Image: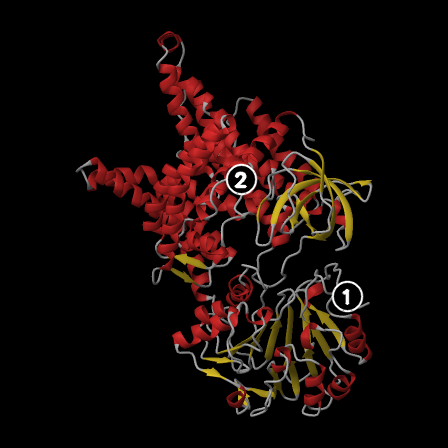
Amino acid sequence: MSRVHPLVIPACALVGGILLANWSGPWPGWPLLALAALPLGIALWRGLKGLPLSPWLLALSLLLIGAGLLSLERTAVLPPDHLAHRADGGQHQLIALALAPAQPATRGRRLLAEALSLDGRPAKGRLRLSLAHGIAPPPAGSRFSARVSLRPVTSLANPGGFDYARHMASQGIRVTAYAGKRSALKVRQARAASGPRAWLMAARQRLARELDALPRGQGRALLRALILGQRGGLSGATREAFGATGTAHLIAISGLHIGLVWGLAFLLLRWGLAAWPGLALRRPVIKLAAAGALLPAAGYAALAGAGTPTLRALIMIACLVAALWAGRAYRPAGGLALAALVIGLVWPSAPLTLSFQMSFVAVAAILLAAGPLARWLRGLAPGPRVLGGLLGWLGLSGAIGLAVWPLAVMSFHQLPVLSLPANALLIPLVALLTLPLALVAAGVGLLWPAGGEALLTLAAWPATGAVELAVWLASLPGAVRYLAGPGPLAVALLYAGALAALLLPRPWRWGLGGALVATGLVLWLGFSGPPAPDGKLRAWVLDVGAGSATVLRLPSGQVVVVDGGGWPGSRFDFGRQVVAPFLWSRGFGRIDVLACSHRDHDHAGGLPFVLRWFGPKELWTNGAAPKGGAYARLLALAQARGVPVKGPARISRIRRLGGASLRLLWPRPGADVAHLPPNDRSLWLGFGLDGSWLWLPGDNGPGVERAVARLLPPGGRQVILAPHHGAKSSLTPGLLTRLAPSAVVFSSACWGRWPSPHRASLARAQAAKARVYGTNWQGCLSLAVHGGAWRVEPFLDPPRPCRQVMPK
């Protein structure tokens, strides 16, 4: 244990307390903090008595402090004048301060702002403001007014899904706003900020203008991400390429970037100070250069937004400088532990973010692997230094990739097969060539705009080359695999085992470390599959906003996916981000049937990804011809992979599937539906067990409802997913009278331009004595039946507030 820096154990204890409170809390925060004072006081008393300071007492205190701080943060009440209390989806008159330059978005532009007043009353809180095309954004640091619609930040609430609302709340953003073409946006004061903050905002705005002057392209977008930390201009294909090659850390400003800035400034200052003989002879040039280089590194961190990785890097560099000035040996593990302590104490939720976790794990891997790797390479390759350096670079890249692999697979379900060669090629191109050139251009541009634009134009060449290289590598066959990752407990055991093997004394190292790793692998590989079939018919209506996606598990274990959600015009892939994580969370690595009710994007958008990575045995469609979009990609992918495509005629012949009854009520085999609107050609599927039925009618309208009503079994234990998301004319009286459903489920968005479900359809469902459920206020809905009534369980309990219609 003598090899362990004394700050490592307390830092692990603080992070452990935060994770524990996140897993099973929150708890009463102030009592935990008061309790933490006891071991802390004992530790300090021992120190005053001249006894050794016990790291375990300090660790116990910090464990309680971490749990208490996160509990206080989670239970904190927003002030009465916070924007979140008035984010109701309606129109409001906003006066705010623009905190950053506007950046490109999928539609128009967006920027970060701080509210000053709302509807003439004082207000506070950060918001993300989206601007329609054609609206000139307010410059950073300006005070502006606009007529905007306000909405709270919400998540798609599904098992295995990403909590977007919590992610945004960790950045202080709980409200989004939209300024349309009639918003009358007006800059009231060009420079409303003061002090260093005003200078920083002005600098960011000037650099943003210089970047906007470059030719459009992904090279310009990458430069913007590297200089300002704004990634809105990066296309979905570019982001996917860097993610698929395991180099996504290059497009997000991290400790690597801050370290390079400090190193470059250190070299320049050292050379400059050494060239001044009078100073070099009287003053410690190296110490002065190291301290002076902190200023440009801190300036770059502030310019880029000061995220967790940048703060971690700054704290570690500051520890290095302090050790240098004190004349003591620098131990990087102590700097890393100190960074974790500072960030965890100031921002308790930071250790819960993937950015924190991956950056710290990567740096820890470098610290632990660099020395042994160098010694091994010296013995293996005593030849030319270039070969040794190349092998060392590849080995260190492999160590980093292996270290972050459990986190990456758990979070992204993505295994970048080409991560090692991609990092070996792209890190020099991006971090060692593009980044220094871009930062020099930014520094020159703040003083001499014309010179800065010329250098930015030069930097755009390697930036464009890096994007094209990443896209090419990602397009290679087998470059990436998607799979179900380990759960949080398995990941924690894997890392605990690795730490035990590296830090514990020899008798315990391999025994305890190996046991922890083996337990983690067993939890992941042995228990990641689906549970055994239990004879029940189960269904999950996923929360996909204003779309539809349903997953069914049949009594014999077969899995059916009907529709996959989607947002027209958005680069958000519902298949990858919503449907697939849900399937993996349930242990479903393969599915049996993939069904697309019709070709509208809000139903078909997520299905291509599901077909590609879950290998369905059959694809069911309504027989519509492809006309571009996700539906066309779905059919093309099915043909390329040899997946049989079945239309209504063949589906109607299937009466039993996986121990459940199956009915296709619409379109009728052989019927001429070409004259009908696309919605009225949707598949109307039914899955039943022992007289209990679940009906999935797609977007069929009232005419189809009347046509199929007589084909439905009368009354009984039946549940229906409201046709067309509960539109005004859906759920006709004839359908409800015939069906007498025990429950009606609405798949609709919590916030949108058109309220759904419509009040009229909701009223008809309630008048029919049906229980009413909705994904917009309850999230994912789990349904199960086995010889009795349907059991429906919402993912959100209590339900979230929602502007759209909710049952009383």
10 Å crowding of disc 1: few (<14), some (14-19), many (20+): some
Residue 357 relative to residue 419: left or right: right
- Which residue is more in the foreground, 663 or 530? 663
Q: Give the x, y percent position of residue 304.
A: 53, 37
Q: Earlier in the sequence, mark 2 or mark 1?
A: 2
Q: Residue at x 60, y 51 (%)?
A: 108
Quadrant of res 289: top left
Quadrant location, the C terminus: bottom right
Splitting the image into 4 quarters, where does residue 387 fall?
A: top left
Q: Amino acid at mark 1?
A: Val
Q: Amino acid at mark 2?
A: Thr
- Marker disc for residue 805: 1
How far is disc 2 from disc 1 in space, using C-alphas?
A: 39 Å
Way the structure is coloured: secondary structure
Left or right: residue 197 versus residue 280 is right
Instruction: Relative to 448, say whether 612 is above or below.
Output: below
Assess whether mark 1 and mark 2 are in contact (beta carbons under 8 angstroms): no
Q: Residue 532 versus residue 640: which sits nearer the camera?
A: 640
Q: Which residue is mark 2?
A: 308
Residue 426: tell me if it is visible: yes
